[in-house]
Image (cartoon, helix red, strand yellow):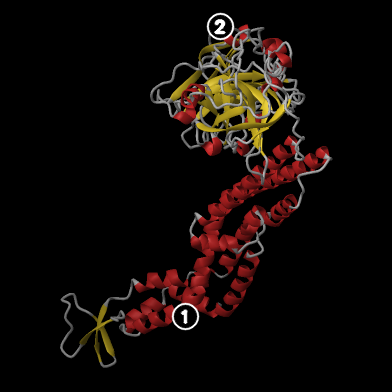
């Protein structure tokens, strides 16, 4: 991970602002080097395919001469979902960028989880790397305008590619070296008297504690966190980090690949954070930040049933919300506890603290369909994988009051609750995706939307509704109690997996439909023109013939000799065949099931248009012939002459309009 970017041009748009560069070697592709360009905002599909030649990439100085040797760059094609695409490899050793095939470069991001990074990979053996190389990220909105660009870090990051960290590949905990984790320090131990009493000044306690609580933003999700009183390692401080924020693993689960998240401080300032360590099993994680956040103490007596506790966090996205209650139960072996203090989505990871402000646990979940039944994970669960402790007893140090009768272990396991919540989130996500898919079609206007929805392809947005409803029904009927916790969690996780698959399918359908809208729009216009020709042709020609008969015979003859007139007559002779053929085309259009069949139908419809071009062109030909008919003629009995330039007819002639005056 490079040092953070410390300077931005005042004209840089936020979406092109780079914060740093990360480097990794993957367990799954050990023959590749991976570079990640981290941005302040989530990356969009067409951010670097906007028609302005915008680009971003990684600049490499492989011989340490302070000059760019090569660059890995985005191309003009948009990113799609969570898929790889080709990137540009530019040779800059001559001073000018030259597209080269020496190295095959791939790039990717993850639009499905709304991440704020771009990944680039190249084979280790395609270049002769020095032991130390210089790396820098770059983005540019409009090249060559000397504006709206950004480098990060400010100068080349010197790093050893052979010593890069291994990227996480779905492990249950991070691969951070224990010796580099923050360590429990000797300060910050809290003593508590009358622990069941409310704080003597809750207003002052809340105001002070809030300064240490943050909102954690990971993709489109959010949770809470708090700065912990612990000593950072030398490697952390040398990289500019000053605080360590604790949260739940499920809050940052979608950001363990990029490691990049955003922290919102109590004053609503946004700062960047780096996901440094996590432990999925115990649902805890640690985040480094270069911002100083006042730390909270977390060492002291083991909490007991009946203790007063407060909870601070961002429930439902509202920051700085305080709730309070008591410790309803606590297990000093598993370090899990419950409280009647209100906990809601968004509280996850926030501090559960005693009357002195000492954190005893992390607000983690709530039991569904139960009131006042929140779950917290005790702070000893941070030991070893998040923070180095001598032992868990260093954090919870025994009781200061008589231990009450143990509370029975809840029938619903905390793991079951977490899995259940994931199913709810997956349902919301896939249903929102289906709604977005339908909104895409409706946004193009009623006429086009009606045409698209008349096809099988247009109904693809809702094609998975039955499967989604089946999962919802099975989930609703699943009991959340029982002794087979592992089996129940597995069943719930299968629901989540299925819903994730459906979500991916809906996104693919949406992207496919979006790329087909131009074909649909063009085809709709053409089919509408054919339908209009069928319904209006004879009436329009009859009206035209009436006007034609008002003209002098010589002019009538001239107009009838026009090629357009012959095409109209030929077209009218095709009317019955045309109507029958058009009906077949309309029926066939309903059977369009995907983009391939859409393109095939568009091609076949062109053949239909060619075959019946005389009929379809009747309205156009009539418009052209109409231009040859004057607005007025002079009529005397059955005789007709053109109106003189004077605008007055000769004696005995009546000035007669050729258009319908009604």
* Within-10-Å neighbours for mark 2: few <14, some 14–19, many 20+: few
Asked if the residue under mark 2 is in contact with the one under mark 1, i.e. CB atoms within 8 Å, the reply is no
- Of badges 1 and 2, nearer the viewer stands 2
Check disc 1: other Cα within 10 Å, few if <14, some if 14-19, many if 20+: some
Q: Which residue is mark 1?
A: 538
Q: Tell me the quadrant of the picture where the N terminus can be found.
A: top right
- With 489 as the anchor, is 540 left or right in this view? left
Res 81 → quadrant = top right
User: Is residue 128 in sight in this rendering?
Assistant: no
Residue 70: which quarter of the image?
top right
Name the image quarter holding residue 376. top right
Q: Is residue 546 above or below residue 416?
A: below
Q: Which residue is mark 2?
A: 65
Say which of 192 and 367 sits in front.
192
Give the distance between the C-alpha atoms of the residues marked 1 and 2, in whole angstroms: 81 Å
Q: Residue at x 56, y 50 (%)?
A: 436
x%, y% of residue 555? 33, 79
Determine whether the residue tagged by mark 1 lies in a helix, strand or loop. Answer: helix
Of 428 and 581, the residue lying toward us: 428
Q: How many marks?
A: 2
Q: Position of residue 518 (x, y in %)?
A: 53, 52
Label 2 SS = loop
| Residue 246 image point, x, y percent | 61, 22
- Residue 104 x, y percent position in the rendering: 67, 25
């Amino acid at each position: 991970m490079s040092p953070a970017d410390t300077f931005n041009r005042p004209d840089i748009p936020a979406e092109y602002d780079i914060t740093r560069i990360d480097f990794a070697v993957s367990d799954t592709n050990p023959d590749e080097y991976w570079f990640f360009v981290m941005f302040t905002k989530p990356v969009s599909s067409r951010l670097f395919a906007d028609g302005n030649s915008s680009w971003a990439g990684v600049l490499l100085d492989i011989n340490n001469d302070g000059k760019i040797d090569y660059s890995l760059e985005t191309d003009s094609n948009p990113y799609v979902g969570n898929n790889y695409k080709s990137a540009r490899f530019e040779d800059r050793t001559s001073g000018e960028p030259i597209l080269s095939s020496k190295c095959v470069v791939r790039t990717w991001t993850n639009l499905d989880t709304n991440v704020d990074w771009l990944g680039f990979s190249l084979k280790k053996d395609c270049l002769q790397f020095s032991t130390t190389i210089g790396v820098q990220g770059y983005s540019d909105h409009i090249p060559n305008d000397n504006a709206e660009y950004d480098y990060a870090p400010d100068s080349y990051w010197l790093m050893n590619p052979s010593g890069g960290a291994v990227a996480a590949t779905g492990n249950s905990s991070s691969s951070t070296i224990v010796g580099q984790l923050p360590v429990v320090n000797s300060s910050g131990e809290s003593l508590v008297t009358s622990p069941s009493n409310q704080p003597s000044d809750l207003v002052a306690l809340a105001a002070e504690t809030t300064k240490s609580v943050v909102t954690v933003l990971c993709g489109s999700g959010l949770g809470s966190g708090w700065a912990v009183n612990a000593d950072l390692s030398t490697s952390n401080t040398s990289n500019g980090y000053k605080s360590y924020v604790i949260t739940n693993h499920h809050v940052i689960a979608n950001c363990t690949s990029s490691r990049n998240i955003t922290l919102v401080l109590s004053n609503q300032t946004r700062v960047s954070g780096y996901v440094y360590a996590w432990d999925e099993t115990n649902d805890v994680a640690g985040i480094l930040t270069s911002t100083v956040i006042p730390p909270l103490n977390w060492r002291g007596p083991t909490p007991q049933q009946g203790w007063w506790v407060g909870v601070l966090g961002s429930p439902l996205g509202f920051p700085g919300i305080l709730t309070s209650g008591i410790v309803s139960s606590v297990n000093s072996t598993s370090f899990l506890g419950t409280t009647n203090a209100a906990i809601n989505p968004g509280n996850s990871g926030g501090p559960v603290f005693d009357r002195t402000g000492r954190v005893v646990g992390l607000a983690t979940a709530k039991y569904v369909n139960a009131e006042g039944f929140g779950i917290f994970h005790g702070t000893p669960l941070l030991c070893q994988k998040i923070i180095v402790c001598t032992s868990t007893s260093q954090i919870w140090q025994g009781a200061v009051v008589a231990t009450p009768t143990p509370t029975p272990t809840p029938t619903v396991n905390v793991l079951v609750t977490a899995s259940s919540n994931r199913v709810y989130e997956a349902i919301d996500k896939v249903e929102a995706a289906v709604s977005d898919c339908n909104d895409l079609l409706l946004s193009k206007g009623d006429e086009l939307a009606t045409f698209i929805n008349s096809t099988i392809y247009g109904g693809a947005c809702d094609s998975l509704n039955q499967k989604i409803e089946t999962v919802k029904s099975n989930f609703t009927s699943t009991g959340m109690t029982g002794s087979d916790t592992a089996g129940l969690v597995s069943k719930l996780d299968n629901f989540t997996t299925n819903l994730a698959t459906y979500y991916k399918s809906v996104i693919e359908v949406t992207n496919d439909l979006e790329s087909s809208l131009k074909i649909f729009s063009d085809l709709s216009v053409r089919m509408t023109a054919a339908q209009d020709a069928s319904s209006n042709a004879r009436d329009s020609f009859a009206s035209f013939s009436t006007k034609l008969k008002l003209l002098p015979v010589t002019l009538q003859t001239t107009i009838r000799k026009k090629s357009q007139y012959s095409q109209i007559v030929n077209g009218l002779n095709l009317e019955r065949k045309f109507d029958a053929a058009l009906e077949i085309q309309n029926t066939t259009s309903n059977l369009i099931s995907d983009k391939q069949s859409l393109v095939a139908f568009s091609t076949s419809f062109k053949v239909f248009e060619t075959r019946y071009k005389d009929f379809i062109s009747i309205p156009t030909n009539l418009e052209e012939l109409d231009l040859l008919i004057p607005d007025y003629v002079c009529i005397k009995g059955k005789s007709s002459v053109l109106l003189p330039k004077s605008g007055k007819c000769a004696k005995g002639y009546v000035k007669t309009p050729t258009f319908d005056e009604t």
